[in-house]
Each structure stands twice: as structure tokens, then as C-alpha cells.
Image: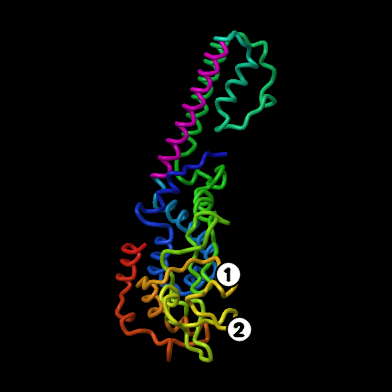
Amino acid sequence: MYETYPNVSWSLLRRGKSFQQHILRSLAEKEDFDQYIEYIHNPRRHFKQFIKNEVDRYYTEQNNMILKMFKGNLREKQQIVSNAVKAATAEVKSQSGDGNMWFRCFTTALTDELKLTESSCGDLSEIEDLDFLDKVLGDSLKERMTKLQDSFASINNIKIKMCRKTPDEILIDHFCQCCWVQCPFCKAICTNAMKGHPGDHCVPFHRNNGLNGWHYRGTTNLATDFCTTEVASDNFFHPNSSDYKIPFKKYRKGGRKYAKWSITPDHSELPYWKWFVCRFQDDLETYHSMTFQGNGEIPYEWKRYTKKEALESLDNYM
């Protein structure tokens, strides 16, 4: 198995930007409504696919650098094994031990690098010349590593699937082992990094509720209000389309999925989502079989946002 190269994976994300920003920026640049819908309704699946696509793109564009890094990691592994051989030899000689003791010291030093057991090697108890063993192993290691280095003449010789853990798996493990609970109003994803975390779910920025199909009762008018402004208003909502209405200010009484959310009553509205609604108004109306009319008419000032301003809002507010 090859040892993976995590530095390649982490380089996929530009410094100073959150993973969420990268997702939203990529969606805006592609302007693919279907991908937006998957992101809104199936964020975990979208995140995983995004990571895989970014790894494939990076692997294609940076193949020379990856090959250089891969060979550098091989040299590093060679040095680690070489050091383990010399350390085992020195320790066993100091204790007048035998070959079996040497093998135990050697494998212990490589616990995090290799999976070896005493059954991996025969009985070494009769080996007394540890300096000779050290030299034979050192020369053999050098010869084998030289051949291995030469075998990787191009990026095509590296089989990613043979890595202990591929770059996309490393990133998925890091970014996707989190809380995936979504806001019951706008479907924003809880930003807590731990699944089953204590306390309430929360997000820095909510979206307008119409993205999730929320509409004004008795009409087919999609809502343009944001969660943060709604919970500061005197408006009501009907949980689960029931006749029972609850003040947005007391949204936690709406049931279990509302009770565990902390939605700050303020006027924080990310311009990005205002641009999105205007850019994909027709698509959203078709998707939900409703319209942004009447009480849900899109404010004129929303229509003035450009994609450039929408992207800048990600950098300024997230």
C-alpha cells in the first residue's frame, strides 16, 4: 500500500476561506440550479461529491508537483526505516540481545508505519552479528527504494486507490464528520463540528425561507423573509402545515425540530442568497410550483446585486 500525501489534500482549500465558502463560490461560478438544489436538500452528498471533484481536478492540474511530493514521501519513509534499523541495532547490542529481540525493537519503532508481527519473519535467535544484519538490511533497503523511485516515472504510475487513505477520503473524514441538522425554516446547515453536539444548533447566516418552499398560508406565494428577521417580527407560522399557528418569536414551541435551534433575532441577511433568488427565480418557482408574488414579491433592491457582489459578500461576512 502506498502512503497517502495529505499535503496535497489540504492544498485544495485556499487559506482564509471556510469550506462552506468554497462550496457556495463554486455553485455561483457554475450557475447550475440542479447542483444548488442538491446542496440545499442533500448537503452531505453534495459536499462529498464536491471534494471528490476537487481532488480529481487538483490531481490533473498539479500532477508534476504531486509526483515530486510523492517521491519526497518515499524518501522520507526510507529514512524512517533506516533509522529504525540503526536504532534497533544499537539498543540490542547494548543489551547483548539476539536477532529476535532486534526484530521486536525494529517493529516497535515502526508501529505507526508498518504492520509487522513476529510471524512476518522466521526465527532470528541464532543471528549474533548485528552489524552485518544492519549493513545487509541497509543496502537492501537502499537498492529497493531506488528501484521503487525509478518505477514512478510519471503521475500515471501512482495508483491513488492503493493509498492507505486517498486524499478525498481524508478530506471527507475531516469535513463531513459534523452536525448535518438543517434549519427547519431555510435548511441552512448547523455549523457545529461535532455530530450529536451539546447545546443548540446554529448557523452564522440563515437563508430566505422560500428556498425551502415556505409560502404564505392560503396562497402559492413563496416567502422572501429570512429566519433571522422573522424571529424578530410579530408574524406567525404553521408547523407541519397544521392549523395551529405559532409566533416566530416563540418558534421553539413548534415541535422537536424547532426546539433545538438557536436563531438570533436580527437583520443579518447574506446578499449571496438574495442574488441567488433573483438569478434562479424561474427555476425556484418551477421547482416549488409556486411564485414570488403578492406578499412574496422579490424586493427591488435584491435585483441590483451582481454575482460579483454576491461572491464578495461571502468573503466579507462568512
x%, y% of residue 176?
A: 53, 56
The mark found on residue 179 in the picture is none
Percent position (x, y) of residue 247? 50, 80
Q: Position of residue 140 (x, y in %)?
A: 53, 22
User: Which residue does the image show at 43% across and 91% down from the upper left?
Assistant: 294
- Identify the secondary structure beneath mark 2: loop
Instruction: Find residue 258 and report its image quarter.
Output: bottom right
The three-letter code of the residue at mark 1 reads Lys
Which element is circle 1 on? helix
Give residue 204's quadrant in the image.
Answer: bottom left
Q: Which residue is mark 2?
A: 242
Decide whether residue 69 is among the magenta residues: yes
Position of the N terminus, as image quadrant, is top right
Name which residue lies at 44% across and 36% down.
71
Identify the main secondary structure in magenta.
helix
Q: Which residues are magenta?
A: 65-93
